[in-house]
Amino acid sequence: MANEQGPQPVHLPEAWAPESWLNREALQQPQYPDAGALAAAEAELARLPPLVTSWEVLALRRQLAEAQEGKRFLLQGGDCAESFKDCESGLISNRLKVLLQMSVVLVHGLRLPVVRVGRFAGQYAKPRSADLETRDGVSLPSYRGDLINAPEFTPESRTPDPRRMIEGHSRSAMTMNFVRSLIDGGFADLHHPEYWDLAWVAHSPLAQEYQRRVDAIGDAVRFMETLSGESIHNLNRVEFFTSHEALLLRYEQGLTRQVPRQWGWFNLSTHFPWIGMRTADVQGAHVEYLRGVRNPIAVKVGPSVTPEQLIRLVDALNPHDEPGRLTLIHRMGRAKIETALPPLLECVKREGRRVLWVADPMHGNTESTSNGYKTRRFENILGELDAAFDVHAAAGTRLGGVHLELTGEDVTECLGGARELTERDLERAYLSSVDPRLNYEQSMELAMLIVKKRGA
Ligand code: PEP
Ligand code: CO
């Protein structure tokens, strides 16, 4: 296995530099009108301190290698897009809380340690289907996320502003700082189901079963504490890692660094960058950029990807088949997973390639309601996840994690769940400016249903 600690280059990427992506076609990038302002912002970004460290990045890579071997399960979740105005204590701590509580349910039910990864501290850039948006005959650049421009439909707001990269770095740093402090403080007391909001359980047809599970988790936590004489917080300092879609390549490049006593380059804007479905062309700039950094990386895989294309991607991103390096996140949709996924699983298995397979049951299940909301049905999210476990079992491969869009708040953006949210309910608390998220209760319910499906 590669010596990941030593200073010697083990697998330096061939003909790569942090800016070599500039020679490839870069989709989904903004047009900055002022080249001088862009150069100044890039220079400033390149001097700012990084948001994560190389040893954290390598620790996550080792954990993902264990997940590939079935010794851990990945829980990756958070907002579709963060916004600068949502960089706020309550929203950040509630999102952390729901992820931690879901992970406790998964650890208990799957009998496996969980790798916790947030979609936060940098999830500020979004791919869009069109470069321009037209309203009443006026065309302006599409909103691409707060890292690039602002959502208001005015020329000032929509003009891409490179200073936003500096602001995005600051907001990410503030988020990271708060997350790290919460984790160092007493936050892990949330292992105790006594602190959870479980009123929804009574509304579920599985109420009794869920209550038994919650009681069992409480017993297990108290047992551990009695046994050791320590609170669970001292026993088990929780670890959280960050991730975001590496979309705005100038930003990613600015935080691509070399560090003392390590070979190669790291993206130190996040632990775990991923390539979105729309920018995953093997010839494209995003694949070129990410193939050269030593972080663990992920790629979203949609239903139109062929087995040949997928293997070319695996070759480009992990030519030496290194453990922990590559995660493939399939996002097929409930209707397509059973036909689209098996050929991909079989091909990667036949070629003997080492990947971590993760299911994103959100992005293939987006639909619009008659009253004009973008939504997802809980039953389709659950159905795709359920099918993902079965399709992997049939192929002799392993589903090693889930990738979800969720929030710790009581929003009404996805339909269904124990409280059976309807189209009318969407009007009550639809807050997302992009994709619909599972709310706190729906997220906890999904965790319970995963362990019902796969639990020990
Ligand atoms: C996302 O994760 O928000 C996203 C845009 O996903 P995908 O690239 O799978 O469409
Ligand atoms: Co999304």
Image (cartoon, grey):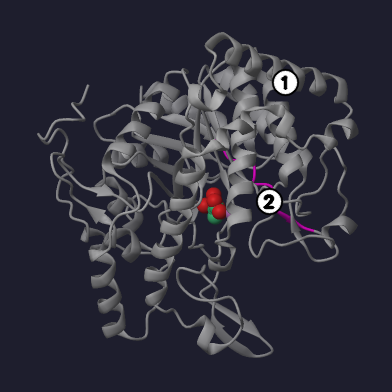
Taking depth in this image into account, of 34 and 196 the one nearest to the observer is: 196
Q: Can residue 383 be seen from the camera position used here? A: no
Q: Residue at x 60, y 12 (%)?
A: 226
Residue 223: percent from left, percent from top: 63, 11
Name the residue beneath numbered marker 1.
452
Q: Is residue 426 magenta?
A: no
Q: Which mark is residue 314?
A: none
Please tell me how crowded label 2 is: few (under 14), some (14-19), or many (20+) other residues with Cα within 10 Å.
many
Residue that badge 2 annotates: 437
Q: Position of residue 453 (x, y in %)?
A: 70, 21
Q: Earlier in the sequence, mark 1 or mark 2?
A: 2
Disc 2 secondary structure class: loop
From the image, give the main secondary structure of the stretch colored magenta.
loop
Quarter of the picture containing the C terminus is: top right
Q: Is residue 360 above or below residue 389?
A: below
**Residue 364, magenta (yes or no):** yes
Q: Identify the magenta region.
A: 359-368
User: Do labels 1 and 2 touch, CB within 8 Å?
Assistant: no
Residue drawn at (47%, 45%), measured in percent from left and top? Answer: 181
Task: Say which amino acid is labelled 2.
Answer: Arg
Viewer-proximal residue among 445 and 394: 445
Whether ligand 2 has any atom under 8 Å from the Cβ at mark 2 is answered as no
Q: Amino acid at mark 1?
A: Lys
